[in-house]
Image (spheres, grey):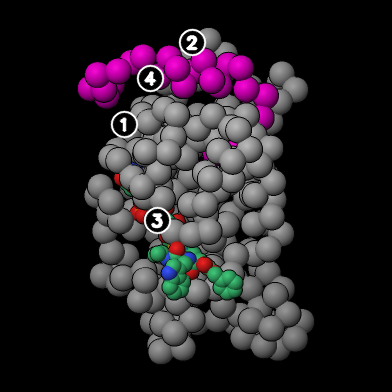
Amino acid sequence: MNDRDSTGDVNRARALLREATNVTVLTGAGVSAESGVPTYRGAGGGLWGGLRVEDWATPEGYARDRPRVWTWYSDRRVQLADVRPNAAHRALAELQRRLAARGGRATIVTQNIDALHQAAGAQDVLELHGSLLRIRCEQCMRREYVGCKPLEHGPTCPDCGAAMRPDVVWFGESLPMKVWHAAVDAAAACDVFITAGTSAVVYPAAGLLDVAKGRGARTIEVNLEATPASGAVDVSLLGRAGDVLPELLDGADP
Ligand code: BV8
Ligand code: ZN
């Protein structure tokens, strides 16, 4: 258990969840860290296969060296075959079930591209930055599920013949609009907004906290360390997401 000196904060967060009927959760790489997926920055953050995300997860990086970027995503995809959801993912899927059982709703909005929320049983996950497990056509946007299989270079689109690419949002690229609008709606409609395992530096995702606060939601952060969001939330819980999130569900039904 964490050596947090304020279990009172956990009780406050639990009380907020108990009274909530509509919860929105924004997750980042820290929620998958305990599954062994490296984070991008912050505590324990690392490079991906020696490549800086900001240099290579960009249209310029792709134009510079398509095969290298395909191999980079292929390696990350193949690694996912041995990765399982952790207690944090399972707790959020359970939170969805418990809220649904009492006529409420919990929406999971993730920046992660590892599909681990879905693997843990979460429903209707909003993937702001796409997914490692899909590729899409550069022209007609046809999407294909490829799972964890290695793909050293992109196939061509069966519909229009154009090149396919990883179905991942790169820096400087806009987010999938339908997903983004659904995420903004979920942040605007919730009673409680939880931001978990994110360094809160990548926008527009990090701005969802402000949308929720602006509409009067109470806010909770779960992270190993302080982030730019910490000063703005009602309750900041320092600890591992795999410990803290299940703790929020412990005991009384939130
Ligand atoms: C957009 C997919 C506009 C790729 C990612 C200059 C030029 C261009 C753009 C910008 C610019 N300045 C700002 C921008 C906007 C830019 C941005 O925000 N940049 C940042 C770096 C300043 N954003 C964009 O470009 C976005 N698009 O703005 O479009 C636009 C509009 C219209 C038309 C055209 C354009 C697109 C952003 C998406 C980029 N793609 N990934 C890939 O992964 O290969 S972002 C990348 O960072 C990941 O997706 C990741 O999800 C995201 C955020 O990182 P986190 O999830 O927070 O992970 P991180 O490692 O940072 O932190 C982990 C946290 O967990 C830490 O706090 C750590 O303490 C904690 N932790 C660790 N272990 C645990 C834990 N917590 C709890 N428990 C643990 N066990
Ligand atoms: Zn196509």
198 to 144, vertically: above or below = above
Give, as a three-letter code, the residue at label 4: Asp
x, y (%) of residue 89? 49, 37
Image quadrant in which the N terminus is located: top left
Q: Residues within 10 Å of mark 4 (few under 14, many from 20)?
A: some
Label pair 4/1, CB-CB below 8 angstroms: no
Residue receiving disc 2? 251
Q: Is residue 18 magenta?
A: yes
> Circle 2 — which element?
loop
Q: Circle 1 — which element?
A: strand
Q: Tell me which numbered mark, 4 or 1, is placed earlier along the sequence.
A: 4
- The disc, 1 or 3, on the residue closer to the chain's N-terminal end is 3
As rendered, which of 190 and 216 lies closer to the eye? 216
Read off the magenta span: 1-26
Circle 3 SS class: loop
Q: Earlier in the sequence, mark 2 or mark 4?
A: 4
Q: Earlier in the sequence, mark 2 or mark 3?
A: 3
Residue 30, relative to residue 60: is it above or below?
Answer: above
Residue type of the residue flagged with mark 2: Gly
Residue at (30%, 56%) from the top-left corner?
41
Type of the residue with mark 1: Leu
Residue 9's disc is: 4
Q: Which numbered dot is residue 238?
A: 1
> Closer to the observer: label 1 or label 2?
1
User: What crowding class fits label 2: few (fewer than 14 Cα within 10 Å), some (14-19), or many (20 or more)?
Assistant: few
Q: Is mark 4 within 8 Å of ligand 1?
A: no
Screen quadrant of the C terminus = top right
Identify the residue position indicated by label 3 in the image. Answer: 201
